[in-house]
Amino acid sequence: MKYSSKTLERVVQSLSKLPGIGEKSAQRIALYLLEEAGEESRELAEAIMDLTDKVGHCSICFNLTDEDPCIFCRDPNRKRSIICVVEEPRDVLAIEKTQSYNGLYHVLGGLLSPLEGVGREDLHIDELVQRIDKGVEEVILAMNPTVEGEMTAAHLAKILESKNVLVTRIARGIPFGGSLEFNDSVTIAKAIEGRMKI
């Protein structure tokens, strides 16, 4: 499609690269920002710049944060004896939304995937093992129920066998091939409550 404004076209093209936004949605958003939003457009632009400039990874759990360590690692009211291991920061958001977990987190930064060349050295597995020696009694493996998620969970369980720690896996309330991010809060809460020893 040809636009009368190169700037508008650039915004539409940039927005349409975002997940779940096609060209028509991108057009509607761009026109709204141009015609209706006014100051909101500037605030959005500043927020996006802050997102790329100020947000990084926690040096302890590798979750996203703009303060290091992150809010969860700093919180004295969280149970320090439990670590919930997840694939990505979006999984932390999904679990926090349930308001049923009050321990610490550890974000792997992906899953083992030999076909894609992702090995142990590409993930934050060694950092997890180092954290276990500091009063941790339980490690909850909350990987998505996919082939890679199951493989990663099994690998972590094997590694943690030598540690004096209970290793549990969230219950199977989440369908195989599904993602934590797209499940409702009740399903995720029940999955955490029904975790079992590996």
Image (cartoon, grey):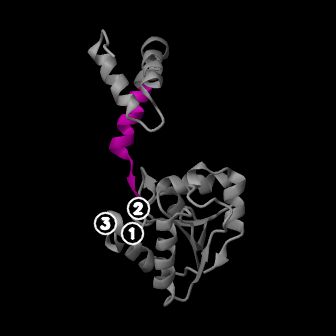
Mark number, residue 96: none
For disc 1, the marked residue is 124
- Determine contact: label 1, label 2, CB under 8 Å: yes
Q: Give the quarter of the image for residue 44.
A: top left
**Region rendered in magenta:** 43-58
Q: For this rendering, which residue is in front, 197 or 58?
A: 197
x and y percent of residue 132 in the render? Answer: 49, 80
C-alpha span from label 2 to label 3: 14 Å
Please tell me how crowded label 1 is: few (under 14), some (14-19), or many (20+) other residues with Cα within 10 Å: some
Q: Which residue: 56% across, 64% down?
A: 145
C-alpha span from label 1 to label 2: 7 Å
Name the kind of residue labelled 3 in the image.
Gly
For disc 3, the marked residue is 117
Q: Which residue: 33% across, 43% down?
A: 53
Task: Name the quadrant of the C terminus.
Answer: bottom right
Residue 16 position (above or below residue 121): above
Q: Secondary structure at mark 3?
A: loop
Q: Secondary structure at mark 2?
A: loop
- Determine contact: label 3, label 1, CB under 8 Å: no
For disc 2, the marked residue is 109
Magenta stretch, overall SS? helix
